[in-house]
Amino acid sequence: MAIHYLPVSWRIYHETARRLAATMLDHTEPIDQIVAISRGGLTLGHLLTDLLRIPISIITIQSYTDIRTSGVAVLTEKLQNSIKRKHILLVDDVSDSGKTLVRATKYLTRAGAKKITTVTMFYKPHSVFRPDYFAKQTTKWILFPYEPTEMILLITKQMEKAGASKADIQKFLQNLDYTEDQIAFVRRHHLK
């Protein structure tokens, strides 16, 4: 089955973050602190800490090993500060399988959070976790603007494995809005 991609530009990413922030400011009781899930939630968390004027902390949960392979959600970096009796805004980039958000909410509840509100930029309908706020629902694989090297590398390796030529891979990547410079960087430094 072919993978369908959803490229997201920096402009769209920023506009979407602003819309999410405006919606939360209009509809959510005051939040004490943001907790961003690293890696995916870092960029959205960074924007929301500015847009909402709320302090931010980070936890790390890892689960994906490939575009189509989701592993067990493992907490690898805990909070460095107390969240007891605080209303937390838990931030991630996408609720795909939902495992990461389930793991994170359990952790924050045990850490003493008074309330947890969740936000992601994207939500996939097959996810076991539906965030309180999300900007768009999709079934596509999202190409975030902050991970071009990772995605160019993964897509290139998959296409090479399927027997695609270098020219076909180049054309496909450019159709996904990756620049010649981004593709050349990956080829020079990561595909030897």
Image (spheres, helix red, strand yellow):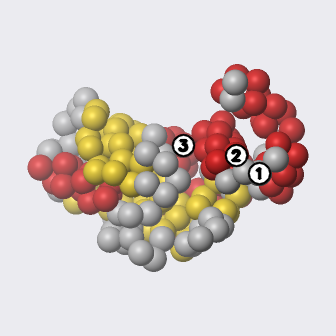
State the residue at coordinates (38%, 64%). Answer: 97
Q: Residues within 10 Å of mark 3 (few under 14, many from 20)?
A: many
Q: Residues within 10 Å of mark 2 (few under 14, many from 20)?
A: some
Residue tagged 3: 43
**Observer able to see residue 45:** no
Of the image marks 3 and 1, the number of the one nearer the N terminus:
3
The Cα–Cα distance between marks 2 and 1, rounded to whole angstroms, is 5 Å
Under circle 1, the secondary element is loop
Q: Quadrant of the C terminus?
A: top right
x and y percent of residue 22 in the render? 55, 63
- Taking the image as shown, residue 65 lies to the left or right of residue 184, namely left
Q: Quadrant of residue 127?
A: bottom left
State the residue at coordinates (12%, 49%). Answer: 110
Q: Mark 2 near mark 1, Cβ–Cβ under 8 Å?
A: yes
State the residue at coordinates (43%, 45%). Answer: 65
- Taking the image as shown, residue 81 lies to the left or right of residue 55, namely left
Q: Nearer the viewer, residue 173 or 144?
A: 173
x and y percent of residue 179 in the render? 84, 42
Under circle 3, the secondary element is helix
Residue tagged 2: 160
Residue tagged 1: 164
**Observer able to see residue 98:** yes
x and y percent of residue 154 in the render? 61, 44
The amino acid marked with disc number 3 is Thr
Q: Nearer the viewer, residue 113 or 54?
A: 113
Under circle 2, the secondary element is helix
The amino acid marked with disc number 1 is Ala
The amino acid marked with disc number 2 is Glu
